[in-house]
């Protein structure tokens, strides 16, 4: 280290030389800076050299999420979004979009907590009762899309790796008073309005009724008690034009009600004769698919006009009469095996729509089950009724074919989501009896691109019109066909279960 002082000859410390001290200080500083700079420069050169030596393929690539539907499902055709049906709904004459005031419009009822993310059968069974509730309360029913995903920023949703529409306008599936159509002559009730119009007319002045305000005073899950409770509450708010059902605890009718075997008898006599059912109609899109495929499942006579040519004002009983000679089987496959095992573990009964009092087939859970578990024998019995194998299906069909209601049956149509190979095996097994002129299935239908995504409704219409129908007592899709058959006057013993 450089000295900061120097001694004279006598050994005493001399006074520091200021210039020399400054020189030494600067020399030390520059020496340190120089060494440090050299090291930094060397490291920088080494870093640059090493980066040039790394192959491009080995460099980390940032993960980027797909930002468009085309990137999310590359090479797949995107499903339709049905804009023409939305346009139709928006142009309904009861929608006064440009009115300076909405004070003269009818009272309205909106249920924002309605079910979503389920098959059409689950959604439709709830829509029917929600619309019936609004009708009973003399309020305009606010109808809504068939919704898989309510996120408005996502037009498409993923279903088993394939895109499906996140929302389908309700008018692409059904017609009639539920979706803003005219009521039949003699019915004085306000016309239904769309969800979009409700938000336009009511968002700034709505009254929200917490679900607990009604259900805390309803002692059962039965439909008649729930309906009465809500109707009384809505009547107490007749001075309020825009009433919304609070989402706390779910919509008025939940899965508990639909799964309760005794939920419907109290309301059924009134429900079945209400215009909600007597003037229910499937959409023009669904009826066109029915007409296009008519020769596949039930050949028509020369003099029979197509369904799509029938006047819309016709009551449902006249619009959708039985198709003579047609037996329809509703058989769920796929993930229903696990669902049926779950039903067995909890000793579940048939759904509410499938336990109407006139129906001949009942299912009482066998004894021996416990909380969340069941005996192997009981599980096997559930599977026979809920997920029958081909041999069990053939035996049940033969049993039903011997009944009085089955006289004249010639054709079989299988409503199913089963794999093509399994369906073909079933068709061959049914045909082996020599009883049937023709056996067809959902897999044989020819559907255009728009009809493909409402195919469940097409199947429901075919099942609804069968001379004899055998369905799954735990299926809501079966349940809607059953309700329509019974409301339209079909003989009860023509509707059976596995």
Image (cartoon, grey):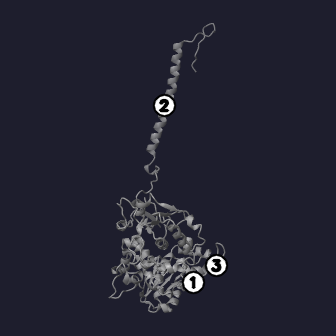
Give me the disc on residue 38: 2
* SS for dot 1: loop
Distance (Cα) linking label 1 and label 2: 92 Å
The residue sitting at 51% across, 13% down in the picture is: 19
Quickly name the residue at label 3. 376
Distance (Cα) linking label 1 and label 3: 21 Å
Distance (Cα) linking label 3 and label 2: 81 Å
Is 464 or 158 nearer to us in this picture? Answer: 464
The image shows residue 196, relative to residue 317, as above or below, that is: above
The image shows residue 447, relative to residue 17, as above or below, that is: below
Within-10-Å neighbours for mark 1: few <14, some 14–19, many 20+: some
Quickly name the residue at label 1. 362
Whether residue 161 is visible here, answered yes or no, is no
Q: Position of residue 188 (x, y in %)?
A: 41, 74
Question: Residue farthest to the front?
Answer: 239
* SS for dot 3: helix
* Comes first in the chain, label 3 or label 2: 2
Question: Residue farthest to the top?
Answer: 10
Q: Quadrant of residue 448?
A: bottom left
The residue sitting at 54% across, 75% down in the picture is: 224
Q: Position of residue 406 (x, y in %)?
A: 47, 90
* SS for dot 2: helix
Is 252 or 102 nearer to us in this picture? Answer: 102
Whether residue 319 is visible here, answered yes or no, is yes
- Residue 222 falls left or right of residue 441: right
* Comes first in the chain, label 1 or label 2: 2
């Amino acid at each position: 280290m450089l000295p900061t002082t120097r001694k004279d000859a006598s050994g005493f410390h001399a006074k520091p030389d200021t210039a020399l001290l400054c020189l030494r200080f600067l020399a030390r500083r520059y020496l340190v800076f120089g060494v440090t700079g050299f090291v930094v420069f060397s490291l920088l050169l080494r870093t640059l050299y090493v980066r040039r030596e790394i192959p491009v393929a080995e460099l980390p690539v940032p993960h980027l999420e797909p930002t468009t539907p085309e990137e999310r499902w590359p090479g797949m055709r995107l499903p339709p979004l049905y804009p023409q049906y939305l346009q139709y709904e928006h142009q309904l004459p009861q929608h006064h979009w440009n009115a300076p005031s909405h004070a003269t419009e009818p009272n309205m009822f909106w249920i924002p907590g309605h079910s979503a993310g389920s098959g059409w059968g689950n959604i439709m069974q709830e829509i029917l009762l929600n619309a019936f509730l609004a009708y009973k309360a003399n309020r305009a029913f606010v109808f809504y899309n068939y919704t898989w995903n309510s996120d408005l920023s996502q037009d498409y949703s993923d279903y088993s790796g394939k895109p499906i529409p996140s929302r389908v306008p309700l008018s692409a599936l059904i017609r009639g008073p539920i979706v803003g159509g005219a009521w039949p002559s003699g019915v004085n009730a306000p016309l239904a309005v769309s969800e979009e119009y409700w938000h336009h007319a009511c968002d700034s002045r709505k009254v929200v009724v917490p679900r607990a305000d009604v259900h805390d005073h309803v002692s059962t899950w039965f439909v008649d008690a729930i309906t009465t409770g809500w109707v009384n509450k809505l009547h107490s708010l007749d001075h309020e034009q825009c009433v919304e059902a609070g989402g706390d605890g779910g919509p008025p009718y939940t899965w508990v009600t639909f799964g309760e075997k005794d939920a419907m008898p109290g309301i059924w006599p009134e429900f079945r004769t209400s215009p909600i059912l007597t003037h229910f109609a499937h959409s023009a899109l669904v009826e066109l698919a029915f007409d296009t495929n008519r020769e596949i499942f039930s050949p028509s006579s020369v003099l029979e006009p197509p369904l799509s040519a029938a006047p819309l004002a016709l009551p449902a009983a006249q619009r959708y009469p039985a198709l003579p000679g047609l037996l329809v089987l509703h058989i769920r496959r796929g993930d229903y095996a696990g669902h049926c095992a779950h039903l067995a573990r909890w000793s579940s009964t048939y759904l509410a729509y499938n336990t109407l009092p006139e129906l001949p087939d009942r299912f009482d859970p066998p004894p021996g089950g416990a909380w969340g578990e069941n005996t192997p024998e009981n599980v096997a019995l559930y599977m026979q009724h809920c997920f029958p194998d081909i041999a069990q299906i053939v035996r049940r069909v033969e049993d039903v074919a011997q009944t009085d209601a089955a006289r004249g049956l010639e054709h079989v149509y299988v409503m199913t989501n089963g794999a093509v190979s399994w369906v073909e095996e079933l068709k061959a097994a049914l045909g082996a009896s020599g009883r049937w002129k023709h056996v067809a299935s959902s897999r044989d239908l020819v559907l255009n691109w728009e009809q493909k995504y409402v195919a469940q409704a097409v199947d429901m219409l075919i099942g609804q019109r069968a001379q004899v129908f055998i369905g799954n007592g735990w299926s809501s899709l079966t349940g809607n066909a059953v309700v329509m058959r019974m409301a339209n006057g079909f003989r009860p013993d023509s509707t059976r279960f596995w």
